[in-house]
Image (tube, rainbow, N blue to C red):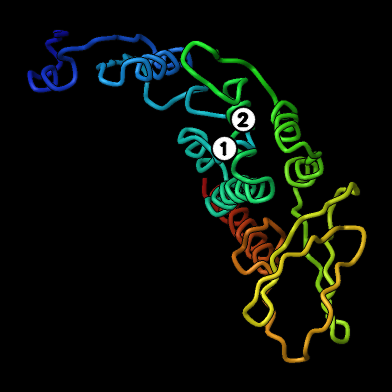
C-alpha cells in the first residue's frame, strides 16, 4: 500500500491498496498503457498518478470536427465568447457527426473512426500506437470504407462556415427542393420528407431541383421531420445574430465601466 501522510487512512485503503500497476503521467501514453493493460487483464487494479488536473491538455482532446470539445476547451471558449455561440458550435459539431453517420451508415462510420484513432479498423492490444494525423486521413478512411467519394460532405460542412440552406418552392401540385451552398462543388444530401404521415427519402442537390409531384393543395408536408440534416434555418440564424450583437454590446458596456 502506498503511504503518504497527506492521504487519509480510508483514502489509502480505498484507492491505493492492492495496486497491480502504477502509471506515472496521465498523458496519451499513460492512458493508452492503462487501457491496454485493462484489456489484457480486466480484473487488474491500475493506478494513474498525475500532478495536474484531469482531464487536461491534449489527452482530453481530439481533432476539431471529430469531437465536440473537451472540458478544458469549452471552459476556455466560455471565458472568451458568448455562451449561446459556444453551445451552438458544440451542437453543430455533434449534428455534423450524426449527419455523417446517417449518410454512410454505422459500419463505415465506426470503421473510419477506429482507423482515425488507431490506424487500423480492428484495434487490439499491441497492434496500434499513438500517431499524429490530420483531417484528410479521416476523409480518406471514410472514402475507403464506403467505396464512395464523400469529399463533398467535408468541403461543405467542414471547410465552410456557412451551413447549406434548403430552398423550397411549391409549384402547382409539386414541391421543388434545392440546396443553396457557399461552395460551388456538388452537394447531394438525402432528405426525409413527410407527406400526409408517410416518409419518403429524396436526394437533393445544389445544381438542380428535386421535384416531388402529385401533391394535393392541402397536403401536409414536413421536411426533415427528425432534424437529421445539419442546415441553415432562418429563425436559428437570426437568433444567433441577435445573441452575438447582445454579447458585443455587453462587452462594450463592461469595457466602458472599467
Q: Residue furthest left?
A: 9
Q: Is 56 in front, or is 178?
A: 178
The label on residue 67 is 1
Q: Residue at x 50, y 39 (%)?
A: 74
Instruction: Tell me if mark 1 has few (under 14), some (14-19) or many (20+) residues whose alpha carbon lies within 10 angstroms of its own.
Output: some
Q: Residue at x 35, y 19 (%)?
A: 38
What element does badge 2 sit on?
loop
Q: Is 12 in front, or is 252?
A: 12
Q: Is residue 134 above or below residue 182?
A: above
- Measuring from the top left, give residue 41's x and y in whole percent: 31, 16
Q: CA distance from mark 2 to mark 1?
A: 7 Å
What element does badge 1 sit on?
loop
Q: Is 194 in front, or is 223?
A: 194
Q: Is residue 163 above or below residue 79?
A: below
- Measuring from the top left, give residue 197's x and y in whole percent: 62, 79
Do the CB atoms of the residues marked 2 and 1 lie less than 8 Å apart? yes
Q: Is 30 in front, or is 241?
A: 30
Q: Residue at x 58, y 54 (%)?
A: 247
The label on residue 252 is none
Instruction: Tell me if mark 2 has few (under 14), some (14-19) or many (20+) residues whose alpha carbon lies within 10 angstroms of its own.
Output: few
Q: Is residue 105 above or below residue 126?
A: below
For this view, does 230 lie left or right of residue 178? Answer: left
- Measuring from the top left, give residue 63's x and y in whole percent: 61, 30
Which quadrant would the N terminus be assigned to in this image? top left
- Where residue 31 sits, quadrant-wise, is top left
Q: Is residue 115 above or below residue 189?
A: above
How many numbered dots are placed on residues in this image? 2
For this view, does 8 lie left or right of residue 91? Answer: left
Q: Residue furthest bottom?
A: 218
- Where residue 153 sits, quadrant-wise, is top right
- Measuring from the top left, give residue 162's x and y in whole percent: 76, 52
User: Which residue is the site of mark 2?
Assistant: 63
Amino acid at each position: 500500500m502506498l503511504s503518504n501522510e497527506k492521504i487519509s487512512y480510508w483514502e489509502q485503503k480505498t484507492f491505493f491498496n492492492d495496486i497491480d500497476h502504477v502509471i506515472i503521467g496521465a498523458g496519451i501514453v499513460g492512458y493508452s498503457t492503462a487501457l491496454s493493460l485493462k484489456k489484457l487483464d480486466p480484473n487488474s487494479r491500475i493506478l494513474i498518478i498525475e500532478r495536474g488536473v484531469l482531464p487536461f491538455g491534449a489527452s482530453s482532446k481530439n481533432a476539431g470536427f471529430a469531437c465536440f470539445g473537451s472540458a478544458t476547451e469549452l471552459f476556455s471558449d466560455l471565458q472568451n465568447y458568448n455562451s449561446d455561440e459556444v453551445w451552438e458550435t458544440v451542437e453543430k459539431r455533434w449534428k455534423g457527426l450524426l449527419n455523417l453517420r446517417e449518410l454512410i451508415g454505422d459500419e463505415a462510420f465506426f470503421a473510419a473512426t477506429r482507423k482515425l484513432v488507431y490506424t487500423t479498423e480492428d484495434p487490439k492490444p499491441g497492434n496500434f500506437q499513438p500517431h499524429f494525423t490530420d483531417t484528410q486521413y479521416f476523409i480518406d478512411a471514410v472514402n475507403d470504407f464506403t467505396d464512395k467519394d464523400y469529399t463533398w460532405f467535408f468541403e461543405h460542412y467542414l471547410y465552410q462556415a456557412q451551413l447549406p440552406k434548403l430552398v423550397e418552392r411549391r409549384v402547382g401540385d409539386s414541391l421543388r427542393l434545392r440546396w443553396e451552398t457557399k461552395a460551388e462543388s456538388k452537394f447531394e444530401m438525402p432528405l426525409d420528407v413527410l407527406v400526409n404521415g408517410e416518409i419518403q427519402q429524396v436526394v437533393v442537390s445544389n445544381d438542380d431541383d428535386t421535384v416531388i409531384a402529385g401533391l394535393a393543395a392541402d397536403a401536409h408536408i414536413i421536411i426533415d421531420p427528425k432534424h437529421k440534416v445539419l442546415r441553415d434555418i432562418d429563425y436559428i440564424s437570426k437568433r444567433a445574430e441577435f445573441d452575438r450583437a447582445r454579447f458585443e454590446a455587453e462587452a462594450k458596456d463592461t469595457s466602458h465601466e472599467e
